[in-house]
Image (spheres, grey):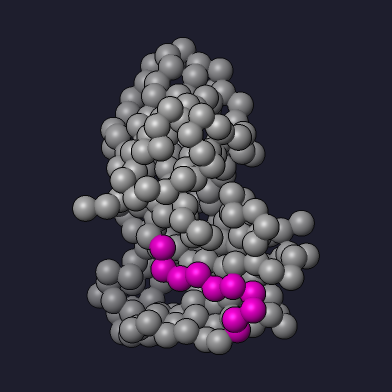
Amino acid sequence: AQKVTQAQTEISVVEKEDVTLDCVYETRDTTYYLFWYKQPPSGELVFLIRRNSFDEQNEISGRYSWNFQKSTSSFNFTITASQVVDSAVYFCALSEAWNFNKFYFGSGTKLNVKP
Amino acid sequence: DGGITQSPKYLFRKEGQNVTLSCEQNLNHDAMYWYRQDPGQGLRLIYYSQIVNDFQKGDIAEGYSVSREKKESFPLTVTSAQKNPTAFYLCASRVSDTQYFGPGTRLTVL
């Protein structure tokens, strides 16, 4: 069965620290997609990144970077030089390539960035 | 601006009443979704629709109903049969493999 685990319920850091949010997934499919979403206090889920299972290249977007490792079934998200505006709940999600209607969400990691 | 709108932002309901949550999108996406989020938890799928006049139950459809008469609109009705309706409700639409979300409606039953 498909499953996404975000073991870190809540993380607190001081501004400018680097922080990594962990995501571990389970799937029997060979083709799948992984996502990260950000949910600020306003509530809307903001799409951050999508990765397919055939592309293990790490990706960097400004202060954000993602590390996808199929060998450990992980898709971790690192924020470099964190800022107060990064405070939010971050969700990792898995989608099956044959059924884009089914997203498996982790329970989320709440990130608190303190000034 | 293209996007997904949900209204109202906050909704209060008395026990025994049905309420309808609005979701509209102008992204021309075919597929739309309703999720429920409870405090400290991930999202659970209520209903989804891939095309107009068609919709499918998700994981927690009991006590909810939907309609899809127009491509742009996918309203969710929370019926009195839903025993614990207080939650945050998120609507989404999908293009290709990615879902995009609206701002959500927070429903509180008094």
Query: Is residue B109 placed above or below A37 in the rendered structure?
Result: above
Q: Residue at x 64, y 70 (%)?
A: A24
The quarter of the image holding the C terminus of chain A is bottom left
Q: Nearer the viewer, residue B26 or B13?
A: B26
Q: Residue at x 61, y 38 (%)?
A: B58
Q: Please provide percent x and percent y for residue A63.
A: 35, 83
Assess whether residue A55 is covered by the magenta stretch: yes
Q: Residue at x 57, y 68 (%)?
A: A34
* Residue B18 makes an appearance in the image: yes
Assess whether residue B107 is covered by the magenta stretch: no
Q: Is residue B89 left or right of residue A14?
A: right
Q: Quadrant of residue B108?
A: top left
Q: Please provide percent x and percent y for residue B77.
A: 45, 24
Q: Give the residues in magenta.
A: A47-56
Q: Nearer the viewer, residue B21 or A6?
A: B21
* Residue B85 makes an appearance in the image: no
